[in-house]
Image (spheres, helix red, strand yellow):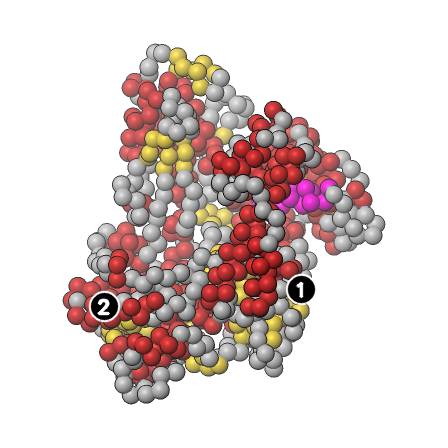
Amino acid sequence: MIYLDTETCGLTGPAVLIQYAYDDGPVTLHEIWNEPVERTLELCKRICNDTVCGFNLTYDWFHINKLYNLLSCVKDRTRKPEIEEVAELRSPTTFCLKPKSALDLFLHASKGTWQSLLDRKDIRVKRVPIQVAQLLAKKLRDKIDIPNLFFHYRANSYQWIIDYSLDPSFPDLVLRFAPSSGLKPLCSELFKQKFLDFPLPADKYPAENGWNPYSTDWKYVIDYHIKFWHNNKTGRSYAEQDIILLQKLYHYFAEPAVGDIDSELACCIGAVRWKGYSIDTDGIRQRIEQYNSSPRLPINHASHIETRKYLQEVATPTERICITNTTAKTLSRLSRFNSEVGVRARQIIEARRIEKKINVLNKLLRVGRFCPDFKIIGTRSGRMAGTGGLNAQGIQHDKEFRQLFTLANDFNILSGGDFISFEVVLADAAYQDERLHADLESGKSFHALLGQALYDLPYDHFITDTGEKTALYNPSKTSAFALLYGAMPQKLAETAGISKEQAEFSYKDFIKKYPRVGIARQIVFDAFCSIRQPSGIGGMVEWHEPADYIESLLGFRRYFTLENRIVRALYDLTQELGDEFSIERKIIRRDKEQTVRGATQSALYAAAFQIQAHNMRAAANHVIQSTGAEITKNLQHVIWQIQPVGVNVWFVQPMNVHDEVMVVHDKRIDLKLIVDAIIEKYKKLVPLIKIDWKTNMKDWSDK
């Protein structure tokens, strides 16, 4: 096995140094710009012929592919590379480099309890009495022990901030995370030892964007990087230490098996990002012109103040209450109103959508290709996430827009497909309700079946005999997804636009018809419901030890270790508030007279219940979404295996976006048999699984 890391000129500029070691042997620093080109090319080939162990291999493998493709075009390989010559080459993409096998220790950590370092939302204890806000902030800090690794990028590290912005008399206490999942910070936490952190000066990095891997601004600063890594002893020690820590971390994690799907896909994503996909540049220019000539709103649609005023101008007193902000979620809700407010909300949504499209298209024109970058484990469900400033996961599904992504060129073809009703068939597999399975197998829509219960209407009010979807189908569909993702009746009421009472009645009616749905959901909720009030609101609150994780149908774990610890600490604090909180004066909190102590307990309980509710929804969601992510990744991985090990021309170039897999591939390769075999394999677990696979597509929209 070869341990690998790179030092690069910025995030997308070329590599300057390759650090590596074989097994537990000594570290070698290969100075790319001080070695003959042929030696670097030979090193890249040797790396490919071995098992590669790294940390965030997506990044390093992108740079190995970029480096080899650039240097392979240098005319005289017996000499050192020249900056200007390499910069002029800009973007050769002939070769795909693939290692014999791979192990990404970052991804391995992300499958265990350290997945909690992935992006996470703030925690708020809302409406704390001002008299005890500072005292409670200190209590929370002392009570809840969270490693500083979760606040690595915060100047003040771990602290609860007092937010007076909403109500100075009842401020919120806010915990804002800023975690680092880098190699050295993680090892510092694991091994309780400080390691070198030796970044280069900020003004020595090139101007760059993640979505443009072909920028050549690096040529103005790379000479500094070359000299730095050659001459600076501390810097060279820093580079060596990366490999030493990789060796140490591999043994700390009990020498995990190599060749797992996520690690292999890390190399796939890195290679594909450099290769990129074809786009219709002429069509893009025409579309930008079309968008720019469309009617403009008389306001700045990006301004919260102007858009709110624009909506309030035509709003009734009742509608004004709903215009709390102009976020996408609020505008979506307002857009359903059959009034002038609804018209204007739809105008703002469309204006923002067009602006986003123009932004994407301008980026594509600057690059000349579509070079998507992905986080292999981008969420705690294990799903991929787009990154790099041009999110492939966010590319909208409208046909006219996707036509601009031709993806394949004249020398290869495009194949791909979507899993059909993926969440629904995965839910069927998870719930195992015989009646629901029979209804779905007969061709009925899960969305319409739920709509029947929510609106107390016959099935044909959602889907007619001819298969046409009625106006009520979309709100039923949205409600169905909410149900699959753990929504309770109150959320279903908001989504479907019905009363809470009707939603509760409809939900009971639905799970009476399909009892295993209710049982399966309740099992998950009970596992993560740690604080309970058996006698109802206002009664005694009890603690029940929650589960630490939940598994997908394929065994991927979503951990709740940190969340459970925080909920337990909040619960314990409600029982431990000392005399310093016993202020005699009564206060009015949320229209209720309470003591300061009582109001503080209420705030703590509310925060704990909120985190717990999120845990329960996330756990219910995980069983479905994570299983879907793993199946989609597995299909992508099987296709990637067609690409030969080593340095070769491109045979397959797969991309995974949500529930679809797109592949640019050699015309001689027939992927249909491979795809059919994967579907057949998973039918044992997901009986209704299907994929709509097409070959020789014109562009991304041709599905």
Rendered view: 208 above or below 75? above
Distance Cα–Cα, label 2 vs label 1: 49 Å
Q: Nearer the viewer, residue 221 or 446?
A: 221
Q: Is residue 481 magenta?
A: yes
Q: Which residue is mark 1?
A: 703
Q: x, y (%) of residue 167?
A: 41, 24
Q: Nearer the viewer, residue 519 or 414?
A: 414
Q: Quadrant of residue 37?
A: bottom left
Q: x, y (%) of residue 233?
A: 16, 67
Q: Quadrant of residue 310?
A: top right
Q: What is the magenta range?
A: 472-485
Q: Is residue 369 magenta?
A: no
Rendered view: 349 above or below 529? below
Asked if one can make out residue 267 in the rendered structure from this viewpoint, the answer is: no
Rendered view: 4 above or below 329? below
Q: x, y (%) of residue 630?
A: 53, 59
The secondary structure that most of the magenta stretch takes on is: helix
Indicate the quadrant containing the N terminus: top left, top right, bottom left or bottom right.
Answer: bottom left
Numbered badge on residue 224: 2
Residue at position x 69%, y 35% in the image: 338
User: Who comes first in sequence, dot 2 or dot 1?
Assistant: 2
